[in-house]
Image: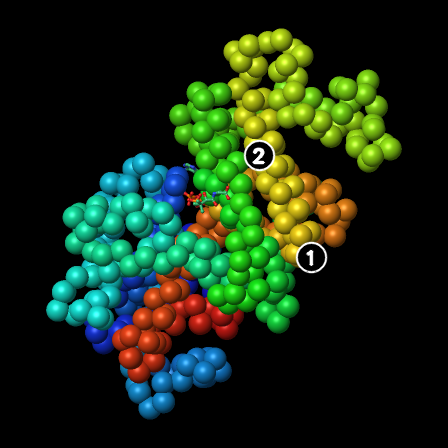
């Protein structure tokens, strides 16, 4: 199976009650709206009885019921929350809102609903109703993050990876030895969740210094017009121009007695005090780099401290702040390695920004089993993937 970042191939079953073939889930966060939707390849419609015993293996046998399985793709898209109208337009143009479920409790209402998580699922309820005529069926954000992470870690072969010294290395996940782990979601703010199993978790910490801080402060300090521009700038910069290093304080020497190299940052932005310069005297790229380093380092350190609190060795980082950026991941990895003395491991996820949206998507399964009383599972995608079919 071709598992590209923006698409996951899989299969799903059409529901008798729906007669619709595209399905949608949303994660409406403080900064970005994440959209996951499934589209059917009609020409690939196959008969369930021709399937391997895949579903049976997981105990999803439908007995004697015979109906088609549709093959298709999971698509991923994102929009800035401040441009929510673009998202509404996208959903409308693709008619994704027409593929939702009918309210089981009140079928007469004839209103579609779609699964949605994140604060915006509450904030924008009316907007979705007015514009698309759909109800947002709200799923808890932490539940969805965990469900999305567990799904990806179990289902997608090349999902988790380490990033050390510029080398990305995929990690083989042993499904029998996945828990416990620390999930750190770096969105606008940061949530740290100890995960002990499917639906078994505790949000153990968080920090308000997250992706929104990087983008907000970065925009003010550099006058960048977009997040991508800020990231691009940070690639070109040199943080040592503005960060105060141990060597700057110790006359170029390491402080070896306490294990600090001369190149370690002693104080982020610290040189701005002693240099006696104005903001305009610094290159925006150096400021951007220093800021990215400061925030990534801080999150790496707090994550490690929480992992230490609970004796967790594995930390998975998600959220759109990461954006697969080498410098961000390297800084986080170094921070975790440094503070844990190599005991804990930082890992990143290919679908980093879509954990919540995937979790909301997977939550449709609850309805197909409990509410819609279908012959078999509607949402075969996760389970099909879980079997590692390619
Ligand atoms: N195109 C983008 N526009 C704005 N922020 C972006 C973009 N790409 C990545 N980011 C970063 O991702 C963060 C949002 O991450 P996300 O996981 O979507 O969180 P949230 O759910 O709070 O929106 C932003 O604060 C910013 O640091
Ligand atoms: C409130 C939030 C869960 C919202 O999620 P987000 O939109 O940032 O992804 C998150 O911003 C957060 O965990 N903030 C940190 C709050 C704290 O623990 O200090």
- The answer to whether residue 19 is seen in the rendering is yes
Q: Which mark is residue 311?
A: 1
* Mark 1 vs 2, N-terminal side: 2
Which residue lies most toward the bottom here? Answer: 64
Q: Are marks 1 and 2 in contact (CB under 8 Å)?
A: no
Residue 295 as seen in the image, left or right of residue 308: left
Image quadrant assignment for residue 52? bottom left
Question: Does the beta carbon at disc 1 come under 8 Å from ligand 2?
Answer: no
Q: Residue at x 24, y 46 (%)?
A: 88
* x and y percentages locating residue 37 in the rendered image: 33, 57
For this rendering, which residue is in front, 262 or 193? 193
Crowd around label 1: few <14 · some 14–19 · many ≥20 (10 Å): some
Helix, strand or loop for disc 1: loop
Query: What residue did someone put label 2 on?
Result: 295
For this rendering, which residue is in front, 193 or 321? 193
* x and y percentages locating residue 123 in the rendered image: 29, 45
In the depicted structure, whether residue 96 falls above or below residue 389? above
Residue 217 as seen in the image, left or right of residue 310: left
* x and y percentages locating residue 167 in the rendered image: 66, 46
Q: Residue at x 70, y 28 (%)?
A: 265
Q: Residue at x 59, y 40 (%)?
A: 299
Crowd around label 2: few <14 · some 14–19 · many ≥20 (10 Å): many
* x and y percentages locating residue 331 in the rendered image: 64, 38
Distance from the alpha carbon under mark 1 to that under mark 2: 24 Å
- The answer to whether residue 52 is seen in the rendering is no
Helix, strand or loop for disc 2: helix
Image quadrant assignment for residue 113? bottom left
Q: Residue at x 44, y 59 (%)?
A: 143
């Amino acid at each position: 199976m071709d598992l590209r970042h923006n698409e996951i191939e899989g299969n799903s079953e059409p529901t008798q009650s729906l007669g619709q073939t595209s399905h949608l889930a949303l994660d409406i966060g403080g900064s970005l709206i994440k959209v996951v939707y499934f589209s059917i390849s009609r020409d690939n419609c196959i008969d369930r009885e021709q399937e391997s015993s895949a579903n049976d293996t997981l105990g999803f046998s439908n007995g004697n019921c015979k109906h088609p399985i549709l093959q298709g793709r999971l698509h991923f898209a994102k929009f800035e929350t401040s441009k929510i109208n673009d998202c509404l337009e996208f959903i409308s143009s693709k008619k994704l809102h027409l593929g939702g479920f009918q309210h089981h409790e009140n079928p007469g209402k004839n209103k579609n609903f779609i699964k949605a998580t994140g604060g915006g699922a509450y904030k924008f309820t009316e907007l979705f109703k007015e514009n698309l005529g759909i109800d947002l069926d709200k799923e808890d954000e932490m539940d969805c993050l965990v469900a999305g992470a567990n799904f990806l870690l179990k289902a997608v072969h090349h999902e988790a990876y380490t990033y050390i010294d510029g080398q990305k290395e995929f990690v083989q996940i042993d499904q029998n030895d996945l828990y416990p782990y620390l999930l750190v979601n770096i969105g606008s703010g940061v949530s740290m969740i100890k995960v002990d199993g499917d639906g078994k978790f505790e949000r153990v910490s968080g920090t308000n210094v997250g992706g929104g801080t990087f983008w907000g402060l970065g925009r003010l300090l550099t006058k960048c017009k977009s997040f991508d521009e800020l990231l691009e700038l940070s690639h070109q910069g040199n943080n040592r121009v503005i960060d105060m290093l141990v060597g700057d304080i110790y006359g170029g020497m390491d402080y070896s007695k306490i294990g600090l190299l001369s190149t370690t940052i002693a104080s982020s932005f610290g040189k701005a005090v002693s240099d006696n310069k104005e903001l305009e005297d610094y290159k925006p790229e150096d400021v951007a780099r220093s800021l990215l380093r400061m925030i990534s380092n801080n999150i790496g350190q707090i994550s490690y401290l929480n992992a230490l609190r609970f004796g967790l060795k594995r930390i998975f980082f998600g959220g759109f702040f990461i954006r697969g950026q080498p410098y961000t991941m390297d800084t986080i990895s170094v921070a975790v390695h440094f503070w844990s003395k190599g005991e804990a491991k930082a890992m990143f996820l290919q679908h980093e920004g879509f954990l919540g949206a995937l979790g909301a998507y997977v939550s449709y399964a609850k309805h197909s089993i409990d509410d819609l009383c279908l012959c078999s599972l509607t949402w075969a995608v996760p389970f099909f993937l879980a079997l590692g079919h390619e």
